[in-house]
Amino acid sequence: MGIFDLLIPDSSKKIYRKEFKSALYTIPELSSREREYVMKAFDSDLGDGLSKFELQRCCQDLMYKPGDVLESGEVQKIRDKLLKYFE
């Protein structure tokens, strides 16, 4: 057990590419272009599974990225939907 596991008890829970993609398709506000953009934005983190911490960090980055195809409300919906996998 590492220090990260002690600080964040559920750090071993991860969401993988299949669940991530499925969750995106349940958000009707996202266009196919936006879904593709989100998949690319999270691609490197999804390789080994996405932890709750990584999810929150990536969403934070997307929320404040200038010139992004996503609005902050859409990023919040993505974050909220994916955080349900960690409950």
Image (cartoon, rainbow, N blue to C red):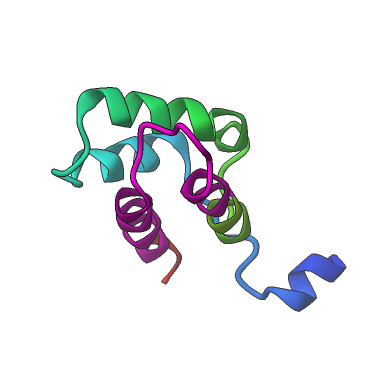
| Residue 1 makes an appearance in the image | no
Q: Quadrant of residue 18?
A: top left
Q: How many marks?
A: 0
- In this image, 32 relative to 38: left or right? left
Residue 81: image x %, image y %? 31, 58
Looking at the rendering, in which quadrant would you find the N terminus?
bottom right
Vertical placement of 42 versus 40: above or below?
below
Q: Residue at x 61, y 29 (%)?
A: 44
Residue 45: image x %, image y %? 61, 37
Looking at the picture, tell me which residue is in the foreground, 50 or 29: 29
Q: Residue at x 35, y 65 (%)?
A: 84
| Residue 37 makes an appearance in the image | yes
Vertical placement of 3 versus 44: above or below?
below
Q: Residue at x 59, y 54 (%)?
A: 51
Q: Is residue 3 magenta?
A: no
Q: Quadrant of residue 22?
A: top left
Looking at the picture, tell me which residue is in the foreground, 46 or 63: 63
Looking at the rendering, in which quadrant would you find the C terminus?
bottom left
Q: Quadrant of residue 19?
A: top left
- In this image, 57 relative to 74: left or right? right
Q: Which residues are magenta?
A: 58-84
